[in-house]
Image (spheres, rainbow, N blue to C red):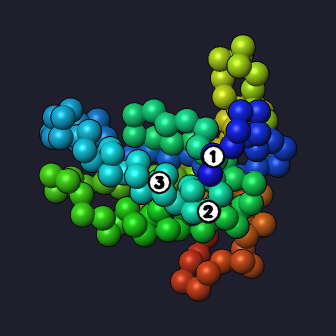
Amino acid sequence: MKFAPGEAPSGTVTMLFTDIEGSSDSVRELGADRWESVLEHHAAIVREELARHGGFEVRSEGDSFFAVFTSPSAATAAVAEMQRRLNVADWPHQASVRVRMGLHTGEARPASAASGVDYVGFEVSRAARIAAAAHGGQVLVSDSTESLVRDLLAPGLALQNLGE
């Protein structure tokens, strides 16, 4: 979902960080030109699900994304669908792509343009650490996110709580 400048979500938000596991090795194996097509396919899937579920793309760099949602249940639905689609995707050059993801709900706000950062708040760092603890193909969630969505999960979904 695109927000007009100054309308990025603020307050209690659910933050998503993603990263492709083993991407450095994949770039070396495939070469930068071939890897670019893999990244394009990956980014298309992530962005389509962000749009479908009301996510706000804060930034992407290399093979990672940072996004925020105003709804933890929408964030959970988005990552479930992202992982499903990433898992069944027909990857260019027979690449193997496994994405680690982390969700955390907490207080954060967009930073002023002068600061050189995009979002501020202790909870942003916590969300990034949660994602970094995941393995490819896995979504880890914080206690705060888990408590908000545990009763709203679609059939067949289960949460793996990091246990902060």
Mark 3 vs mark 1, CA separation in Å: 14 Å
Q: Residue furthest top?
A: 114
Query: Secondary structure under badge 3?
Result: helix
Mark 1 Cα shell of 10 Å, populated few (<14), some (14-19), many (≥20): few
In this rendering, the answer to whether 65 lies above or below 148 is above
- Residue 30's tag is none
Residue at image x 61%, y 38%? 58
Tag 1 secondary structure? loop
Q: Mark 3 vs mark 1: which is more N-terminal? A: 1
Which residue lies under the disc numbered 2? 53
Q: Which residue is denoted by mark 3 in the rendering? A: 46
| Residue 69, image x, y percentages | 69, 53
The answer to which of 140 and 68 lies nearer the viewer is 68
The answer for how far apart the CA atoms under marks 2 and 1 are is 12 Å
Residue 13 versus residue 87 in the image, above or below: above
Q: Amino acid at mark 3?
A: Val
Q: Residue under circle 1? A: 2
Picture layout, residue 81 above or below residue 38:
below
Q: Nearer the viewer, residue 110 or 163?
A: 110
Instruction: Give the mark nearer the N terminus: 3 vs 2.
Output: 3
Task: Name the residue at 76% across, 21% down.
Answer: 112
User: Does 155 appear above or below 73?
Assistant: below
Identity of the amino acid at label 2?
His
Residue type marked 1: Lys
Q: Residues within 10 Å of mark 3 (few under 14, many from 20)?
A: many
Q: Earlier in the sequence, mark 2 or mark 1?
A: 1
Q: Quadrant of residue 149?
A: bottom right
**Residue at 24% of width from left, 57% of height from top?**
91
Q: Is residue 110 left or right of residue 44?
A: right
